[in-house]
Amino acid sequence: MTSEILTIGDELLIGQIINTNQAFIAEQLNLINIRVARMTTVGDEMVEILDAFADAWQHHDIVIVTGGLGPTHDDITKKAVCKFFDTDLVQNQDVRTHVQEFMNRRNRPWSPAAEEQTMVPRKAEVVWNPLGTAPGMLFAEGDKRFIVLPGVPYEMKEMILHSVLPLLVLLVHDSVIRHKTLRTTGIAESDLSAALGDIDQLLQGARLAFLPSPAGVKLRITVFDTDAASADRKVQEVEGRIREKVEKYIYGTGKEELQEALGRLLLERKKTIAVAESCTGGLILQLLTSISGSSAYVDRGAVTYSNRSKTEMLGVSPDLINTHGAVSREVAEAMASGIRQAAGTDIGLSVTGIAGPTGGTPDKPVGLVWVGYADLSCSLAVKHHFAGTRETIRERAAAAAMELVRRKLL
């Protein structure tokens, strides 16, 4: 069973609003084994909307439409639906009662716009909207379903979870979709692909998506089957073959972020950490402390951006900075040791680099980052060359720093 998600609105096409509806609906459909074959976005133009309706309805079993159900002149989805299914609008008394109660609770007077919201296509079944005034609409033809929902995210989500999914799950027969995401860091997408080798042999009928980001590459395994146990087994087999090749780069699964994986390890090992940051400007500490309970292992952080702050707060020798430069192995190590000693923690972590776009030299170009590490038994620094914008370099440096600690703990 395949589906298409169709979102409507000029605001989506010009980038004024980020289209989060598609991602949410797609995730929910996959959870009940309905494959999303396509996502489409069109503007508030009748011809384009009708063309999109026709194409989606022809090629897919489930069509879910969001947007354009409001009371203003540019909300034309309901009119388009009536044209497409050759029906007219009629007043629904249950919807009218709901809208009246909704308006009364907010002390708002009745208006032509409110009256318009009580009208629904004659051929449609109403999909209840407990959080707003615009009702959803359901058209059925055999096992095919055409569902129209408001574009307001919190209204749409409520309707999907409590009205739409319970209806659709009854239609799914002999179709199972399984996904599993492995999260990697410390290796580029091209290198990761090369390390995995023969993809066909690796997957044996499954699918694998590479999803890169500044912090790392996610590997999403997808299996389609007719039996849940068989699908789960195939996912496990593919995961096992992937881990045989790139285990050391995998820090977590699902939605687990690198800072969560590191925090879990610090808790398990009963270790504490302090961070000294230059080019990342506090980003590492922000990530580490975004996890509930992180006070059990994060002691403190220092943003030592200037050379003077590195000396005054971390005890880095001015001579060391003058000799080697602030962006160097020697200074990174001294920063890590300095913050560890100042905090009395098990681990000290530091970052110093050139995030750009200015400040680079032939010897020390933009993107050069040194990550320092210190514990009771050793201190070291690792050199990196990152590409991208200033923000991308900062994100990659933060990820590299956390990954260094994770590797040391393992």
Image (cartoon, rainbow, N blue to C red):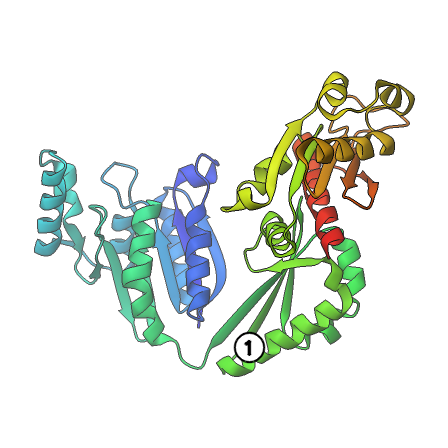
With 181 as the anchor, is 185 left or right in this view?
right
With 165 as the anchor, is 91 left or right in this view?
left
Label 1: how many residues lie within 10 Å, few (<14), some (14-19) or many (20+)?
some
Residue at point 9%, 44% (across, down): 100
Q: Quadrant of the N terminus?
A: bottom left
Q: How many marks?
A: 1
- The answer to whether residue 58 is above or below residue 95 is below
Give how far across and how far down residue 363 sits, in percent: 90, 27
100, 293: nearer the viewer? 293
- Quadrant housing residue 12: top left
Secondary structure under the numbered disc 1 in the rendered image: helix
Residue at point 63%, 69% (across, down): 207
Taking the view exactly as shown, the residue that stands out farthest to the top is: 308
- The answer to whether residue 227 is above or below residue 158 is below
Q: Can residue 242 be seen at all in this image of the molecule?
A: yes
Q: Can residue 388 be seen at all in this image of the molecule?
A: no
Q: Which residue lies under the disc numbered 1?
A: 232
With 172 as the anchor, is 82 left or right in this view?
left
Q: Quadrant of the C terminus?
A: bottom right
92, 262: nearer the viewer? 262
Q: Amino acid at mark 1?
A: Asp
20, 274: nearer the viewer? 274
Give how far across and how far down residue 327 sits, in percent: 82, 28
Give how far across and how far down residue 9 sits, in percent: 38, 42
Give how far across and how far down residue 131 sits, in percent: 23, 48
